Amino acid sequence: MSRRRIVLVQPACGKYDLFIRDMPLGLIYTARLLVAEGYDVRIVDQRVLKERTRDELRRQVTEEPPLWVGFTVMTGEPIYHTMRLAELVRRHCDAPLVWGGIHPTILPEITIVHPLVDYLVRGKGERAALALSRAVAGQIGLADVPGLTWLDGDGGIQSNAEDDDSTWGRMPPVPYHLVDIDDYARSGFDGRVFPIMTSRNCPHKCTFCYNSALKHKLRWFPDSVDDTIAHIDRILAEFAPSYLSFIDDDFFVDLDRSRAILRHVEAVKPPEVKVGFRGVRVSDLRQLTDDDLELLRRVNTRHLNIGVESGSDRVLKMLKKGMRAEHAVAVNRRFARYPDFVPLYNFFSGIPGETEEDIRLSTQLILQLTAENPHCQISGFHQYTPYPGNELFDQAVEAGFPVPRTLEEWGDLRFEDNARKCPWIDARRRRLLETIYCMIYFVDAKYDMYFADSSPLLKALHPLVNLYKPVARFRLRHHVTALPLEIWAKDAFYALFYRAAKD
């Protein structure tokens, strides 16, 4: 066993791997202290390697058996892929298998008892990864590893307190060299998309979100403005991105901080480099002044991913979104004055107690947003997935949600069709949600921007898609679910995709 090599694995995530493949920042950040301490860290990314993943992982763990092998794991399909890759590692070396990420953090007790999990790390992993390396090497005890969960000699579950990242202070530079930057891309984006994270955690308490399901909920903790500026300068100088993507859970929590960062971006960024924001709330956008919008325009802002979630004020109150539907309309109208902005609005449905009228309010809002701002897009109309530990999960269980009891069962969740597991959604409602999910692809310019040029087949279908768009809007407006040819086509496509992913 090598005392210095550590292999970190990014499993496939599912259908979104077809369109979005960002750098595995969770693993790269986890490696920061390891790299600074001289460990030989290797990253194996199944989203990039695809069918070559097993051969590459086998090579990494056999040519020089590592100290440990780590997996970052989200709830749902990534669990399936992680288990298959962990089985391969187990067959070829004796290194401990370490699981981290959202799912082990939310459900450590279910995760740690699985035979393919030797240790799991809850919460942030930088200092935990370094401490675990020392523990596996016999230099410190397991009790000294923050956030570690393991089984003792009697099979009892032992857990240490999670790390408090607010006490970290300055950290080593992010080791982007661990991956080939050019392996990562997004459909519809030209050039190099570079994600940057400038803050941790989320201060909000939405009842459906995995952030509010974390048992060790930390306050929002931003990097300092000076550190963020230095980080941006490094990215621009070393990697020459075409697009700078801020992937904070919420970038606009502190508007003074946001303004300071964006003013620096305006001063140093080449004009052609575009900017986007993954985490944006309507309640924050309402606070932006006209000067703020002009600043966003000057830094060449393109995409703002905005969680609207529902067009029903009743549902929004249940979700604790801190907004009303009319607020999304007002923000959208302001953005319509900026043709270069592409607001991406996310919706979901299927929560306990939601009515068809609530869903109709959502589809009406979607049609209104796209009519009043032809530049906006609807990023999705997803089906609610219960995350353990938050308020909405408890309501889902009371409504009959069959709580998965094993890793395998949690790995069977599919976010695009989770209504099949929610007993409060009957067959008629399920078909409605599936129909809306499909129609969302055709109510705006998504196909033109992201799909039309991604393959010869999709390019050939482009004229038919344009002809179909009025039909999609009609079906969406009137909740027409008869003859669901679109659902059958979608199911056939994803069945082929999932089969290929599992081979």
Image (cartoon, helix red, strand yellow):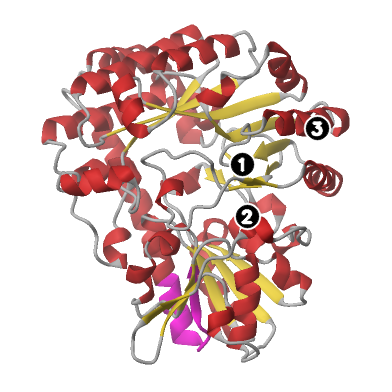
SS for callout 3: helix
Task: Determine contact: label 1, label 2, CB under 8 Å.
Answer: yes
Seen in the image, is 260 located left or right of residue 8? right
Question: Which residue lies at the image location 83% right of the left edge and 32% below the top edge?
Answer: 264
Name the disc covering residue 490, or none. none
Question: Which residue lies at the image location 82% right of the left edge and 26% below the top edge?
Answer: 271
Based on the picture, tell me whether residue 97 belongs to the magenta stretch: yes
Magenta residues, as a range?
Answer: 84-99
Q: Position of residue 470 (x, y in %)?
A: 35, 11
Label 2 CA crowd tier, 10 Å (few <14, some 14–19, many 20+):
some
- Amino acid at pointer 3: Val
SS for callout 1: loop
Q: Position of residue 354 (x, y in %)?
A: 22, 29
Cα–Cα span, label 3 and label 1: 16 Å
- When the figure is inspected, residue 391 is found, relative to residue 26, above or below; the finding is above
Q: Position of residue 363 (x, y in %)?
A: 32, 18
Residue closest to the eye, 495 or 141: 141
- Amino acid at pointer 1: Ile
Question: Which residue lies at the image location 51% right of the left edge and 34% below the top edge?
Answer: 456
Name the disc covering residue 265, or none. 3
Cα–Cα span, label 3 and label 2: 21 Å
Seen in the image, is 168 located left or right of residue 354? right
Residue closest to the eye, 368 or 58: 368
Q: Quadrant of the N terminus?
A: bottom right
Question: Which residue lies at the image location 37% right of the left edge and 25% below the top edge?
Answer: 440
Dot 2 corresponds to which residue?
Answer: 25
Q: Position of residue 49 (x, y in %)?
A: 56, 61
Based on the picture, tell me whether residue 15 belongs to the magenta stretch: no
- Amino acid at pointer 2: Leu
